Image: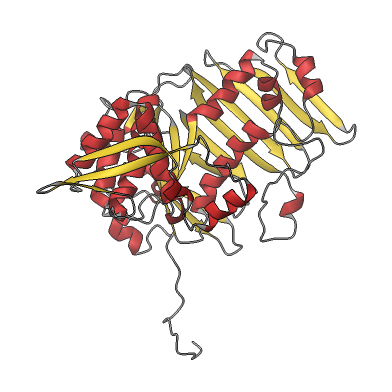
Amino acid sequence: MIIEFSFSNFRSIKERQTLSLVANNSLVTQDKKKLLPENLIELNAPGLPDVKLLKSAVIYGANASGKSNVIKAIDFMQDFVMKSFTGLKPEEEIGIPFFAFDSISHEIPSEFEAIFINNGVRYQYGFVLDKWKVHEEWLYAYPKGRTQRWFHRMFNVKKERYDWKFSKEHFKGDKNGIKIGTRHNALFLSTGAQLNNGQLKSIYEWFRNNIRFLDYSSSNVERGIGLSAGIMLEDPDIADKVKKFMRHVDFGIDDISISKKEFSEKDIKSSSPVIEALLKEDPEFFKDKKFIDIKWLHKNVNTIALTSVDESTGSLKCFSLLAPWIDTLINGYTVFIDEIGANMHPILLRNLFKMMNDSAINKSGAQIVITTHDVTLLDTELFRRDQIWFTEKNAQGETELYPLTDYSPRSGEALQKGYLAGRYGAIPLIRGDLKLDGNKR
């Protein structure tokens, strides 16, 4: 489970920004039900008495305000943990996009830090890096509420080497062997995991397995459909739940047939430029390969099987989201979804978040963070006020991330109306009357 993420000097983000999933205890209302206690995770972690986490958060902002970059920053952190040791060659440049709207940020290191819960223990892990090396890296554990420094490395500019600090009592394994194997452009965490250090591998596995990203932009619809179908093939229980939901929302779909099939000559002879290019490079490319075949069964007088080409966009979007959503609830992942609302009816989204907030369904502490423009979700009957975040660019082009609670909205305030009226910022700024007739304004 995520407690909070912090990051700086990444894309449109210059100064340190923090996305917190800690419930705001200062929220006060006479009607306790309006605090939506079902939206909270009871943490019970050592050293964090009375702290509760949020099951979800929603980020709003104008186009190009940087809300997607918040998710990309977290994605970069996970990716660098996964690939810094195996994906980069010695002395290879680290591909990090610094803040671009000034002349000095490309010379200043970027910082990423995550505070999270793994197997009931709180951890604090982060690193500072530029395009050539990791300047600093640290990992602290709080198994009994008290700090354990597993390691801390910092580059000493004068000596041109790293200064290392370890807890002799708490770090287990061959630290010197891992130190020797850690390159300037790689993480000690990633190196230790590859060298099979048990402690570091557990943190590495948390980043790899528990953090998930879903892209539901129009260019990735087919990928989302394939992902959902693949999960259903692997897990019949999830498949049954997806089919039940699809019938329940009345898409007119009675059943969904999913199977793996070999490519036929008709498939291979497709005029698709992509297929033609693959065959030109390798005439045997499709030999012994299978694809996922999906049929959407509609029953009227007779049962009609439609392909995805003929199925409605809304049905496909809902289907592509359902299996990963249910998989998240079962396994307790923390998932980040950019622009979730496109081609998705608001009532369907509300029902998905009701599933997320239902403790009988979400038994594993799953969390979902989304970005959206769908203002119908700005509803205090669906989200607590501390679950709503905004991004806005300042005059220097820097993204600022801030929670709705900064504005101290009163209990029961009409959030949708207030947001569209500009009360909380994070909306498009249109200067004067928009004219397209060539006249200057």
Residue 317 is situated, as x and y percent measured from the top left of the image, at: 34, 49
Residue lying furthest right = 159
Q: Residue at x 29, y 46 (%)?
A: 349
Q: Residue at x 50, y 50 (%)?
A: 401
* 138 sits left or right of 276 in the view: right
Snapshot colouring: secondary structure
Q: Residue at x 48, y 28 (%)?
A: 210
Residue 76 is situated, as x and y percent measured from the top left of the image, at: 60, 41
Q: Residue at x 45, y 61 (%)?
A: 62
Residue 411 seen: no
Residue 266 is situated, as x and y percent measured from the top left of the image, at: 42, 50
* 46 sits left or right of 150 in the view: left
* 300 sits left or right of 212 in the view: left
Q: Quadrant of residue 168?
A: top right
Name the one closer to the observer, 343 or 153. Answer: 343
Name the one closer to the observer, 426 or 297. Answer: 297
Residue 75 seen: yes
* 425 sits left or right of 112 in the view: left
Q: Quadrant of residue 129?
A: top right
- Above or below: residue 77 compared with residue 305: above
Residue lying furthest left = 301
Residue lying furthest top = 169
Count up the numbered dots: 0
- Above or below: residue 291 compared with residue 147: below
Residue 84 is situated, as x and y percent measured from the top left of the image, at: 69, 34
Quadrant of image for the N terminus: top left
